[in-house]
């Protein structure tokens, strides 16, 4: 399941919605990404997340389908926010559930690693010195490349 | 052809999207990017760092040798930074 939204999300409520009443799920692994304060004490910073409506949902759906093809998963959920966010705000939620923990752990890690290098989102940071677009990190490409078959 | 621009590419070009007729002879993504870069100073500045320009055709990531046609939706953007 994919959701791209401006609003915040409730991790506990989303988890309960996925697993409630299901008795074949033995493991739930979730990842929550938060906005870090990039100004590091130099003043308040916030960010604005821009995305490509339509392609974002397609790309997240493609990544989710890839995870479900690789691991025996029960349910998956990706919620990604866009718009203006402050340090400490939740940006992204990834949940993978499975009968067994290994598949849930691996799928969750795969989903966030692949999402970071292929879902069309861009971060604009606004600090005391003005606005700057965040550069893509080589470490994110390396993290995603680990999952290449 | 519908063109969409995102992040600093959008900021430098100055508009988020536009409809353009593809000139004759432009059949690949790299040719399209070269032609766009010649359309004015904003375009040239947006597309100067060619290694930082990513392209999607009809909402799928593609390489520079991918074909383009007049009815396509083509998006130009920097490397993505979500998550």
Image (cartoon, coloured by chain):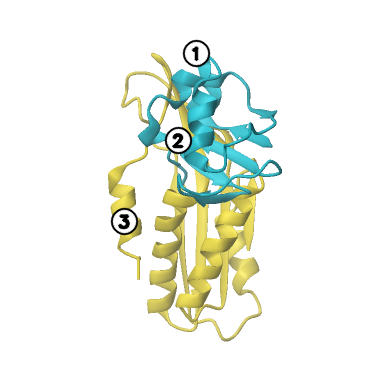
Please, what secondary structure does the residue beneath circle 2 have?
Answer: loop
Q: Is residue B50 left or right of residue A73?
A: left
Q: Colour of chain A?
A: yellow
Which SS class for mark 3? helix
Q: Could you say which quadrant of the image residue A24 lies in?
A: bottom right
Evaluate whether residue A86 shows in this view.
Answer: no
Q: Chain of mark 2?
A: B
- Name the residue: 45% across, 61% down: A111
Q: In the rendered image of this protein, does residue A18 appear above or below residue A92?
A: below
Residue at 54%, 35% in the rendered image: B32
What is the chain letter for disc 3?
A
Chain for disc number 1: B
Image quarter of the N terminus of chain A: bottom right
Tell me what residue is drawn at x 56 percent, y 57 percent: A60
Residue B41 — which label? Answer: 1
On the picture, is A13 further left or further right than A106? right
Looking at the image, do the residues carrying marks 3 and 2 touch, with CB atoms under 8 Å apart?
Answer: no
Chain B takes which shade in the image?
Answer: cyan
């Amino acid at each position: 399941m994919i959701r791209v939204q401006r609003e915040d999300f409730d991790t506990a409520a989303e988890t309960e919605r996925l697993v409630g009443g299901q008795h074949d799920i033995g493991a739930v692994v979730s990842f929550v990404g938060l906005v870090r304060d990039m100004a590091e004490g130099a003043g308040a910073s916030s960010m604005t997340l821009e995305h490509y409506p339509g392609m974002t949902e397609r790309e997240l759906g493609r990544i989710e389908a890839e995870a479900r093809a690789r691991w025996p998963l029960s349910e998956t959920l990706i919620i990604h926010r866009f718009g203006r966010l402050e340090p400490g705000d939740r940006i992204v939620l990834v949940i993978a559930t499975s009968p067994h923990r290994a598949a849930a752990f691996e799928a969750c890690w795969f989903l966030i690693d692949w999402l970071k290098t292929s879902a069309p989102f861009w971060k604009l940071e606004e600090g005391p010195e003005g606005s700057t677009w965040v550069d893509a990190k080589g470490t994110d490409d390396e993290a995603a490349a680990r999952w290449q078959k | 052809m519908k063109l969409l621009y995102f992040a600093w590419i959008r900021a430098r070009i100055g508009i988020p999207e536009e409809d353009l007729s593809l000139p004759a002879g432009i059949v690949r993504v790299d040719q399209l990017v070269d032609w766009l870069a010649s359309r004015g100073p904003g375009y040239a500045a947006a597309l100067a760092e060619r290694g930082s320009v990513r392209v999607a055709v009809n909402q799928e990531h593609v390489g520079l040798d991918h074909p383009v046609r007049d009815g396509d939706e083509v998006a130009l953007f920097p490397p993505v930074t979500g998550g």
